[in-house]
């Protein structure tokens, strides 16, 4: 496993947003991170790490991330009321942006069609339904960087969804309007499948670098996710029916 690149030195607060309610922490590099530890669930941590690595390989503008370490001393000292939900050991950390704004219906129009299609295809590939945004609202789990003027991808804790629904995905995904553009263009579909195949070459390294502890909820109790189901979801990109919809 890759050694953690950040050590958590201070726990500042806990987010009230999202199912996992990550902790906002300061690392030994001085940066702030949204940290998902034990309380977020082992499945969530694994999904975040695998998805983040694949997003990088696929070319998406994902927020900087790292494997971080929470020292046992922080937990034992109970420096934060809900510290046990963070836990000690290796955690998934996503670096905070200096000027973020949640993507809205308005800023969605600033995203280039090329990037919008990239996000749509990536979520389809990873069976990630958790990117809803319609005229009625929603939570796209995407940020607009006000300083850089660009899209930033975050949150993949619900990837590899066992209950993924094609119709629901295409109805509410923030960039669903581009689906027909991709589906009707054989050249574009082949290009995306080549990109996915190239990203899959990173899979052995991604697997090796998942912390061993993440595969267990408790001693002898396996986490609610297996490598085989993740790999099976990803390897769909090689099949002829990958693009098929109801």
Image (spheres, rainbow, N blue to C red):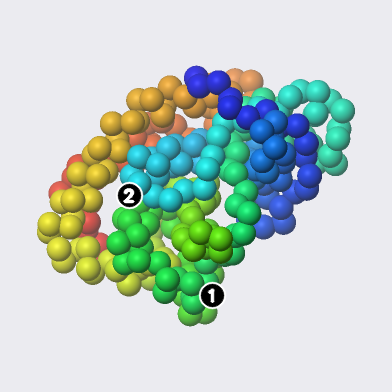
User: In terms of depth relative to the viewer, which is nearer, 52 or 96?
Assistant: 96
Other-residue count near label 2 (Cα within 10 Å), few / some / many at <14 / 14–19 / ≥20: many
Q: Position of residue 133 (x, y in %)?
A: 48, 70
The residue sitting at 80% across, 29% down in the picture is 75
Disc sitting over residue 58 in the figure: none
For label 2, the residue is 125
For label 1, the residue is 137
The residue sitting at 66% across, 40% down in the picture is 31
Relative to 45, say whether 20 is above or below.
below
Q: Farthest residue toward the front?
A: 147
Quarter of the image holding residue 88?
top right
> Is residue 241 something that shows in the picture?
no
Label 2: element kind: helix
The residue sitting at 66% across, 33% down in the picture is 29
Classify the position of the C terminus by image quarter: bottom left
User: In terms of depth relative to the viewer, which is nearer, 7 or 164?
Assistant: 7
The residue sitting at 40% across, 42% down in the picture is 56
User: In terms of depth relative to the viewer, which is nearer, 154 or 20?
Assistant: 154
Q: Is residue 133 left or right of residue 96?
A: left
Q: Is residue 52 left or right of residue 231?
A: right
Q: Position of residue 2 (x, y in %)?
A: 50, 21
Relative to 172, say whether 145 is above or below.
above
Decide: marks 1, 2 in contact (CB < 8 A)?
Answer: no
Other-residue count near label 1 (Cα within 10 Å), few / some / many at <14 / 14–19 / ≥20: few
Q: Position of residue 142 (x, y in %)?
A: 51, 59
> Is residue 133 something that shows in the picture?
yes
């Amino acid at each position: 496993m890759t050694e953690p690149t950040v050590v958590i030195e201070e726990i500042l607060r806990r987010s009230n947003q999202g199912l996992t309610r990550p902790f906002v922490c300061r690392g030994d590099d001085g940066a702030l991170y949204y940290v998902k530890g034990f309380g977020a669930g082992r499945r969530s941590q694994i999904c975040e790490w695998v998805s983040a690595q694949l997003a990088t390989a696929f070319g998406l503008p994902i927020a900087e991330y790292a494997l971080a370490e929470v020292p046992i001393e922080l937990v034992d000292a109970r420096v934060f009321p809900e510290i046990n939900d963070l836990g000690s050991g290796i955690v998934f950390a996503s670096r905070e942006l200096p000027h973020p704004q949640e993507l809205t219906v308005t800023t969605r129009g600033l995203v280039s069609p090329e990037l919008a299609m990239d996000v749509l295809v990536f979520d389809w590939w990873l069976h990630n339904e958790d990117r809803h945004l319609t005229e009625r609202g929603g939570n796209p789990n995407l940020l607009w960087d006000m300083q850089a003027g660009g899209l930033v991808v975050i949150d993949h804790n619900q990837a590899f969804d066992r209950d993924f629904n094609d119709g629901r995905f295409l109805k509410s995904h923030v960039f669903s309007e581009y689906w027909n553009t991709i589906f009707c263009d054989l050249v574009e579909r082949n290009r995306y499948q080549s990109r996915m195949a190239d990203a899959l070459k990173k899979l052995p390294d991604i697997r090796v670098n998942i912390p061993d502890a993440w595969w267990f909820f408790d001693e002898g109790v396996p986490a609610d996710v297996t490598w085989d189901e993740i790999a099976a979801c990803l390897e769909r990109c090689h099949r002829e029916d990958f693009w098929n919809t109801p």
